[in-house]
Image (spheres, rainbow, N blue to C red):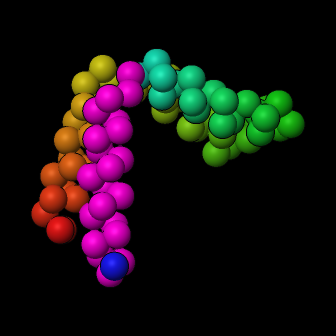
């Protein structure tokens, strides 16, 4: 499988998963992934920005991002 095809497949899969996951589930997952890093270093820039982005995402943003990923994946295929 060519890298372009693999990228397109991951975009379609990611978009499909994002369509089915709620904003609260995304926030929970980000908190799980960044919790240890922020416990060790509360000033961790990357973990802090990820958590802030997940907390402030707009209601329609996950749907838009998911649609964009699926369309991009279909165009590359």
Q: Residue furthest bottom?
A: 2
Q: Residue at x 35, y 38 (%)?
A: 17
Looking at the image, which residue sits at the far right? 40
Magenta segment boundaries in residue numbering: 2-22
Q: Position of residue 51 (x, y in %)?
A: 58, 31
Q: Quadrant of the N terminus?
A: bottom left
Q: Residue at x 31, y 55 (%)?
A: 11
Residue 15 is inside the magenta segment: yes
Position of 1 with respect to 76 (left or right) is right
Q: Quadrant of the C terminus?
A: bottom left
Vertical arrangement, residue 75 with respect to residue 68, above or below: below
Residue 45 is situated, as x and y percent measured from the top left of the image, at 67, 43
The answer to if 64 sits in the magenta stretch is: no
Give the overall secondary structure of the magenta segment. helix
State left or right for residue 32 relative to residue 69: right
Determine the image quadrant of residue 50.
Answer: top right
Residue at left offset 22%, top offset 59%: 73
Q: Is residue 62 shown above or below 28?
A: below
Location of residue 10 by image quarter: bottom left
Q: Is residue 32 above or below residue 70?
A: above
In the foreground, 77 or 45: 77
């Amino acid at each position: 499988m060519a890298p372009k095809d693999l990228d397109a497949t991951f975009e379609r899969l990611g978009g499909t998963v994002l369509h089915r996951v709620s904003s609260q589930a995304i926030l929970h997952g980000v908190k799980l992934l960044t919790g240890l890093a922020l416990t060790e270093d509360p000033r961790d820039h990357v973990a802090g920005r990820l958590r802030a982005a997940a907390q402030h995402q707009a209601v329609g943003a996950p749907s838009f991002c998911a649609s964009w990923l699926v369309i991009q994946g279909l165009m590359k295929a």
